[in-house]
Image: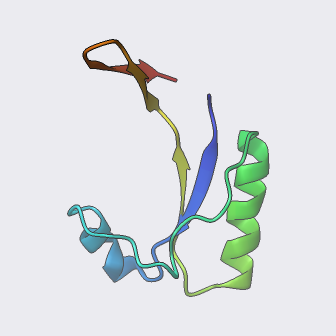
Amino acid sequence: MKFWMVINVIERSDVAEFLCDEQIPKSSAPTYMHAVRENAEIELLRLSVKFPAGEFYLLEAVASVSRAMNEDQQVFRVESN
């Protein structure tokens, strides 16, 4: 399954923090999954106009994991999107 999400890093100075395995503040976390990349890009532009102090990034789902239960074990499967 492919989808895209927009994240607001708020200010450019905050980018380094997000790239260091930090938790994303709730106020900046993505809230919508776009099934079409072009729609996500439109949202990216819309938000950048609405919040000019923000620094927005488009995230793409690149892998997923699913779990299946076997009789005696759990089986995890990772798939590239």
Q: Residue furthest top?
A: 71
Position of 62 with respect to 6 (left or right) is left
The residue at the point 35 percent across, 13 percent down is 70
Q: In this view, does 71 lie to the left or right of 33?
A: left
Residue 57: where, in percent of width, then height?
52, 60
Query: Who's the residue at 72% across and 48% down the image?
Result: 34
Is residue 9 left or right of 20 when viewed as pictured? right
Say which of 12 and 40 sits in front: 40
- 78 shown above or below 19: above
Residue located farthest toward the left when viewing the structure as drawn: 20
Frontmost residue, 8 versus 66: 66
Residue located at (48% from left, 78% from top): 26
- Seen in the picture, residue 54 relative to 38 is either above or below; the reply is below
Image height of 46 relative to 67, above or below:
below
For the residue pair 35 and 9, the one nearer the viewer reads as 35
- Quarter of the image where one finds residue 69: top left
Give the left or right position of residue 41, taking residue 58 as reference: right
Q: How is the image coloured?
A: rainbow
Image coords of residue 68 (percent x, y): 42, 20
Residue 63 location in percent, x, y?
44, 30
Identify the residue shown where x is 73% and y is 83%: 50
When the figure is inspected, residue 71 is found, relative to residue 19, above or below; the finding is above
